[in-house]
Image (tube, grey):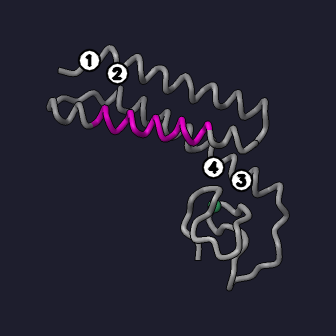
């Protein structure tokens, strides 16, 4: 069966790391390293959320509070990443609009390589 104690501890760790990311963001600014670390945390939290939901489903059990805790942690990380993207975009003055070959992501506004298929900032599909 499911080890709920282990899952709860894990959920607490995820929430805690989300909290720490906020502090890092405030202290160090919006550097690429912070961003990558945050993306890794987000991916990890998403994986753990998926594993939890899967385990619960397999066992035919429900634990909405625990699932919600993971979702909150994922949402928090997601928001931090969005805030980072916006901050990155704010630093780069918008160029002249070039609809044929956008050099700014329409999703997050970050600068992208001309002809790029995906935004290197938020991963949105371009073009
Ligand atoms: Zn983008």
Name the residue at 71% across, 61% down: 110
Give the mark nearer the N terminus: 1 vs 4.
1
> Which residue is disc 2 drawn over?
7
Q: Position of residue 107 (x, y in %)?
A: 62, 64
Compared with 11, 75 (above or below) is below
- Most foreground residue, 19 or 45: 45
State yes or no: discs 1 and 2 in contact (Cβ < 8 Å). Answer: yes
Q: Quadrant of residue 109?
A: bottom right
Name the residue at 58% across, 77% down: 127
> Which residue is disc 4 drawn over?
82
Compared with 74, 66 (above or below) is above
Name the residue at 16% across, 34% down: 58
Q: Which residues are magenta?
A: 37-53
Q: Marks 1 and 4, how far apart in space?
A: 33 Å
Q: Looking at the magenta stretch, what is its main secondary structure? A: helix
Give the mark nearer the N terminus: 2 vs 4.
2
State yes or no: discs 1 and 4 in contact (Cβ < 8 Å). Answer: no
Q: Marks 2 and 4, how far apart in space?
A: 27 Å
Q: Is residue 48 magenta?
A: yes
Quarter of the image for the N terminus: give it: top left
Q: Secondary structure at mark 3?
A: helix
Disc number at residue 3?
Answer: 1
Disc number at residue 33?
Answer: none
Q: Secondary structure at mark 2?
A: helix
Q: Secondary structure at mark 1?
A: loop
Q: Position of residue 113 (x, y in %)?
A: 70, 69
> Which residue is disc 3 drawn over?
86
Q: Marks 1 and 2, how far apart in space?
A: 6 Å
Q: Is mark 4 within 8 Å of ligand 1?
A: no
State yes or no: discs 1 and 3 in contact (Cβ < 8 Å). Answer: no
Compared with 103, 109 (above or below) is above
């Amino acid at each position: 069966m499911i080890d709920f104690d282990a899952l709860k501890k894990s959920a607490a760790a995820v929430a805690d790391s989300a909290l720490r990311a906020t502090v890092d963001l405030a202290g160090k600014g919006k550097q690429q390293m912070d961003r990558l670390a945050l993306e890794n945390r987000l991916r990890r939290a998403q994986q753990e959320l998926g594993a939890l939901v899967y385990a619960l489903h397999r066992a035919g059990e429900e634990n909405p509070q625990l699932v919600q805790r993971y979702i909150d942690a994922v949402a928090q990380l997601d928001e931090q990443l969005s805030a980072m993207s916006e901050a990155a975009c704010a630093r780069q003055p918008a160029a002249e609009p070039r609809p044929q070959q956008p050099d700014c992501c329409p999703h997050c506004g970050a600068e992208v390589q001309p002809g790029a298929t995906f935004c290197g900032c938020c991963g949105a599909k371009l073009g």
